[in-house]
């Protein structure tokens, strides 16, 4: 499950000051705790599994940026780094 889906359909996380309406992965920014590379979740790697989906650093660092875990019928979001919001590119 991608974060943009989790946010729009499950209300798991919503950044401060976010405008109403859908938020895309391309607008969510994370800074890798290992290499400090700033990247959007659309640029990060994404591995989707039935019970766990993981966003990873685009540089292949071993620390996941965001994990979305399925527990029964619920989804839990764990961000390993603060997530920010970036306006869409013009
Ligand atoms: Zn990294």
Image (tube, rainbow, N blue to C red):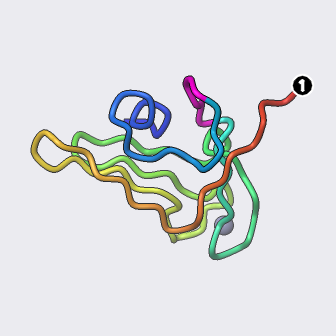
Instruction: Classify 9 as above or below 84.
Output: above
Residue placed at 10% from the left, 45% from the top? 72
Camera-side residue of 29 and 44:
29
Left or right of 85 in this view: 76: left
Classify mark 1: residues with Cα within 10 Å, few (<14), some (14-19) or many (20+): few
User: SS of the residue at dot 1?
Assistant: loop
Residue appearing at x 64%, y 76% in the figure: 34
Q: Is residue 66 left or right of residue 36?
A: left
Quadrant of res 19 = top right
Q: Residue furthest left?
A: 72
Q: Across the whole image, how many numbered discs are drawn on residues?
A: 1
Q: In which quadrant is the C terminus drawn? A: top right
Q: What quarter of the picture does the N terminus occupy?
A: top left
Q: Residue furthest bottom?
A: 34
- Left or right of 36, for residue 51: left
Q: Is residue 56 above or below residue 14?
A: below
Q: Is residue 35 magenta?
A: no
| Residue at 23% from the left image edge and 40% from the top image edge | 50
Residue 71 percent across, percent down from the top left: 15, 50
State the image coordinates of residue 18 (x, y, percent, origin top left).
Answer: 63, 39
The answer to if 24 sits in the magenta stretch is yes
Q: Could you tell me residue 5's position as x and y percent?
A: 42, 30
Tell me if the residue at label 1 has its CB under 8 Å from ligand 1: no
Q: Quadrant of residue 89?
A: top right
In magenta, the rendered stretch is: 20-25
Answer left or right for 41 relative to 68. Answer: right
Q: Main secondary structure of the magenta part?
A: loop
Give the residue pinned by disc 1.
90
Q: Horizontal and vertical percent for residue 51?
A: 22, 46
In the rendered view, would you say 72 is above or below 1? below
- Image quadrant of ligand 1? bottom right
């Amino acid at each position: 499950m991608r974060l943009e889906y989790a946010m729009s359909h499950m209300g798991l996380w919503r950044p401060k000051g976010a405008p109403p309406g859908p938020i895309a992965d391309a607008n969510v920014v994370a800074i890798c705790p290992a290499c400090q590379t700033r990247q959007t979740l659309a640029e990060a790697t994404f591995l989707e599994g039935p019970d766990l989906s993981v966003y990873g650093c685009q540089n292949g660092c071993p620390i996941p940026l965001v994990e979305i875990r399925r527990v029964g019928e619920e989804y839990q979001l764990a961000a390993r780094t603060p997530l920010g919001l970036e306006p869409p590119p013009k």
